[in-house]
Image: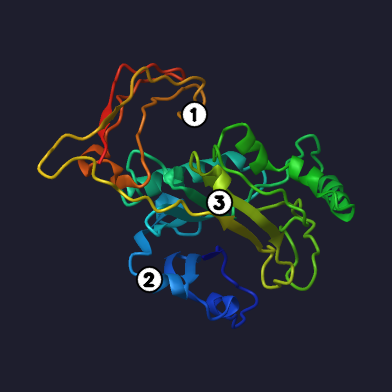
Amino acid sequence: MYATADTRAFTRIRLQLPTPRLQLGGNFVLLEEKKAGQMKLFVYIRIELSEQTGMVTNLVKGSENTGVGHVLANKGGQAISFTLNGTTSFCFVNSHLAAHEGKCDKRNSNIQEIFEGLANTGRFGNKNLDIAQYDHTFWFGDMNYRTALPEISDKKLKHKVVTDWVAEKNYAEIAAHDELGREVREGRILTGFHSAPPNFRPTFKVKRGEGVEYNMKRTPSYCDRVLWHSAPRHENNIICSEFTSCEGFITSDHKPVRAQFAVTPSPVMEIIEHVAPGESIFPQIKFSNLKGRDLHRADGPGFKSDPYVVFLCNPPNLIPEEQRKITTKSITQTLNPDWVDEPFFSLR
């Protein structure tokens, strides 16, 4: 599979660029696309997979604009999700977030709006869960998070400090001051997502053309990112084998990035009927004494959370369809819930 995204219009230089399919070669075909203004998301799949009946199921797409009135499509996110071979689910999210230094909280808010907006479409998987419910979720795009050096107020000095690190190839030091990394580590946004350490020069803001020359009006930053999240018991099934920038791209004030992953699909499970023909008794699994401790504070500063438990299985048809929406009751404003519910499920 191959996913690609674009979040900017080329206003000064217009070139006839080859389509992603031509760049990928003749072995890929477009699976799905989602466009909102100048924001575009494309997912390609190998032709031999696309020709297998039932290989791709539950194909869904949607978007959430975060521009003025949630209508203007200059900022926002687009998503495409699907299940491969009946066992492994994927979701790809492209986002273009609020620009400019000092707008970290606004970018965080944009991400929350995208999460909520996509969930409110009612199209993406279990309605009780957010977009990270899939086996593997990839979030990428021009996320606009900046290099944060709050102790330096002089813009020219800040620019020099970072460009000196660039000249020394001290990319780890730049990443250590990255807003997005800080926000994820401290649990304010994209909890459970991972990103590979950048071993390349910051991708913004550069002068259009060959090479990498930074605009003096902006602090060099890793604005262009790729993150991923894997569901429990799937974390060891994915490896990020490459994360790099495309410095040969000359038509933007960003240098695009690309990442490559190796994913081990979940095995196909055969459903074996446990009862004799004519019988209606099934084995059951029952949950009791359910507890949560030190949960994530999801309702924002000054609040806690209203946690409840959602039950999932893979493959979903291990339990009857009418039982797949069972949840515990919600316990309001706590990070240490104790549930008295004892939900049970019939196993097919």
* Residue 253: quarter of image: bottom right
* Residue 103: quarter of image: top right
Q: Say which label, 2 or 1, has the lower sequence index.
A: 2
Mark 2 is on which residue type?
Gln
> Where is mark 1, residue-wise?
300
Up/down of 131 relative to 48, above or below? above
Q: Say which label, 1 or 3, has the lower sequence index.
A: 3
> Where is mark 2, residue-wise?
52
Seen as rendered, the residue at the extreme left is 278
Residue 77 visible: no
Mark 3 is on which residue type?
Leu
User: Which disc, if any, is residue 194?
Assistant: none
SS label for mark 1? loop
- Residue at the image position 38 percent from the left and 64 percent from the top: 55
**Front disc: 2 or 3:** 2
**Front disc: 2 or 1:** 2
> Where is mark 3, residue-wise?
97
* Residue 116: quarter of image: top left
User: Label 2 neighbourhood size at 10 Å, few (<14), some (14-19), many (20+)?
Assistant: few
Tell me the distance, in whole angstroms, between the alpha carbons under discs 2 and 3.
37 Å
Up/down of 275 relative to 342, above or below? below
Residue 101 visible: yes
The residue nearer to you, when weighing 265 against 111, is: 265
Up/down of 294 relative to 233, above or below? above
